[in-house]
Amino acid sequence: SIFQSLTTADESVFGPFDGWDLALRNFVVAPFAEEFVFRACMVPVLLPHWGSVLTTLCCPLFFGVAHVHHMLELMRNRNTNASSMSSMTQILLITLIQVCYTSVFGVFSAYLFIRTGHLFSAVLSHVLCNLFGLPDFVGVASHKWPLLVCVVYCIGLVSFLCLLAPLTTPTLFQ
């Protein structure tokens, strides 16, 4: 089930979670709390001073850095058979990638919040992002139909880029 795949770690920084606790944290509490803090609280304060472009690009950096705490979980659960240096290098690389993609998601979420004027759009996109995760680009090569998967990824990306502005037109949300 989906909850089994989401709860592969036995323990996190916050203590033991069973499937429902982790799902509640990932799909309700974290999306609402993070979007409330980083969109509903920060964006309205920064927007009048920085403008929409700078706010959309800079506010998510705070959101990305706020996810550095996942490094503690990785350090706690790291493979004890690996050498300490290579293990720590891998953890730092994973954390850097995580900060980068959460910052990119933060740009998208800030854009949604500013365009629609509603926190719900940012929270819903956050829930969906947590649910689906990142596309499995590495697994494409070993897929039965790798070319088809690449074409579908490209169609999805182009569709997303083409439909983002029209589907977030502010007049649709008034």
Image (cartoon, helix red, strand yellow):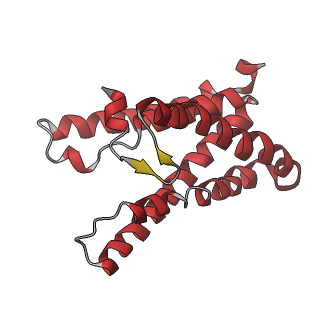
Query: Which picture quadrant has residue 79?
Result: bottom left
The outermost residue toward the front is 16
Residue under the image location 77 percent in, 39 percent down: 40
- In the figure, 46 relative to 35: above or below? below
The outermost residue toward the bottom is 85
Residue under the image location 35 percent in, 69 percent down: 90
Query: Which picture quadrant has residue 142?
Result: top left
Name the spot of residue 143 as percent of width and height, x first.
15, 40
Query: Which picture quadrant has residue 171?
Result: top right
Relative depth, front residue between 173 and 136: 136
Name the spot of residue 21 as percent of width and height, x first.
49, 33
Relative depth, front residue between 10 and 141: 10
Relative depth, front residue between 56 and 86: 86
Q: Quarter of the image for the C terminus: give it.
A: top right
Name the spot of residue 10 as percent of width and height, x first.
36, 46
The outermost residue toward the right is 48
Residue under the image location 58 percent in, 28 percent down: 124
- In the figure, 87 relative to 117: above or below? below
- In the figure, 50 relative to 27: above or below? below
Q: Quarter of the image for the N terminus: give it.
A: top left
Name the spot of residue 112 as percent of width and height, x first.
66, 35
Relative depth, front residue between 20 and 66: 20
